[in-house]
Amino acid sequence: MDHETLFTRACRVIPGGVNSPVRAFNAVGGTPVFVSSGKGSRLTLADGREVIDCCCSWGAVILGHADPGVTEAVARAAAAGTTFGIATPGEVEFAERLIARLPGMDRVRVVCSGTEAVMTAVRLARGATGRDLIVKCEGCYHGHSDGLLTKAGSGAMTAGDGAETAGDGLPAGILRHTLTIPYNDADALARVLDAHRGRVAAFVVEPVAGNMGCVPPLPGYLERAAALTRAAGALLICDEVINAYRFRLGLYSHGAGIEPDLVTMGKVIGGGFPLAAVAGRADIMDRLAPVGRVYQAGTLSGNPVAVAAALEVLKRLESDPPYKRLAARAKRVADGIDAAAVKAGVPLRVRRHATVFTPFASDRLPTDLAGARACDTALYARFFHGMLRRGVYLEPSQFELCFLSDAHTDADADAIIAAAEATLQEDC
């Protein structure tokens, strides 16, 4: 079925025709695509075309689509019952396996989305410190809860209206409790902590920012930010919904030499299902209900089918870590696109950090939100559609990450580069 027909039908019954704004093509123009199936590194679209997938469910599908081991684990779990709303042995095993890879973390609470995980971490921080204010970085996205949708990266930036928040319906009274500073600017953090001494509950940060495109931390930034946060009596929340298990077994934070008080995880650890988690020290986590007074709940939290998929993914990542392979392949793709842009004389440069990358439509690679906003989104739109016509699906926004799975091959990498060479020469 053609995408125009599907989109027309969808718009009659779904706001904007999509169930998440990131699936819309508002930032690049045109009609969003619909996927019929996926296998390995490839997607089959509803119109029958096959494309190489560089989205990978926004980073969640690290082993590739319809991985046999994952699908078999899911089938076994579903046959035993899809949901109970009662604790299961799989939840215990999953929590034990996570905690074993998270030094300094004693407890983990499983939820259904990254938004829920960060909401829980923020509530915990406020409950533990007795303070109200949260500090976040401009351009970092921490889910769609009211208090964090200010200068929130890809969502508001893609709207293109220059709004400070991601839209209407956000009470000013709630937003006043969130303070924003530039990413990669520890001096700004020091100033805001000093100006609001004794009132900041937590500093929440993506260690590697991924919602203004790929913007990694500058040398020493995370270490100084952690020290400043602790000195102020606030908690450090590392939002690793994208980062955790994407770059290494466990947390990016630990590889960077910092120890968060709370960490949120999602994407990879969910095994392709709606599953996320918040972890932390016992003295903080034990404030959660039912043992503490910080309330959080979820009927489908720890869903047995999702947990089965998650366990299979974690076991596979531990038995055969793919990170060197993924980084090498991502480097091959990023370097190839970069070289093609230089040859074509197009102001597009690729920022890669280990296993992720973003083609920025700019001569300068950004280090913060201001730099990301300077990119040429119209140029990126032409690049996106040219790649799609040539069989490569990128994220339909300048301000997101590209991902590869362990199912991507060198042949896939070469095909992506070839598509980029043609696109940059002919369409940009």
Image (tube, rainbow, N blue to C red):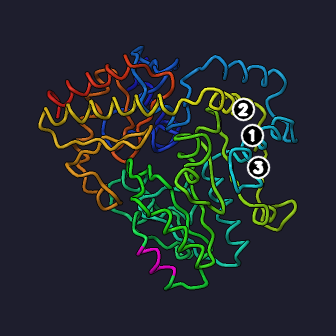
Is 191 within the magenta? yes
The dot on residue 298 is 3
Q: Report the mark closest to the observer, 2 or 1.
A: 1
Q: What's the amino acid at mark 1?
A: Arg
Q: What's the amino acid at mark 2?
A: Leu
In which quadrant is the N terminus drawn?
top left
- Is residue 379 left or right of 332 when viewed as pictured? left
- Is residue 115 left or right of 152 when viewed as pictured? right
Q: Report the mark closest to the observer, 3 or 1.
A: 1
Q: What's the amino acid at mark 3?
A: Gly
Mark 2, residue position: 311
Q: Are marks 2 and 3 in contact (CB under 8 Å)?
A: no
Q: Give the Cα separation between the discs numbered 2 and 3.
A: 20 Å
Which element is circle 2 on? helix
Q: Are marks 2 and 1 in contact (CB under 8 Å)?
A: yes
| Residue in view at x 79 percent, y 25 percent | 77
| Residue in view at x 35 percent, y 25 percent | 392
Mark 1, residue position: 97
Q: Report the mark closest to the observer, 2 or 3.
A: 2
What is the x, y in percent for residue 380? 26, 41
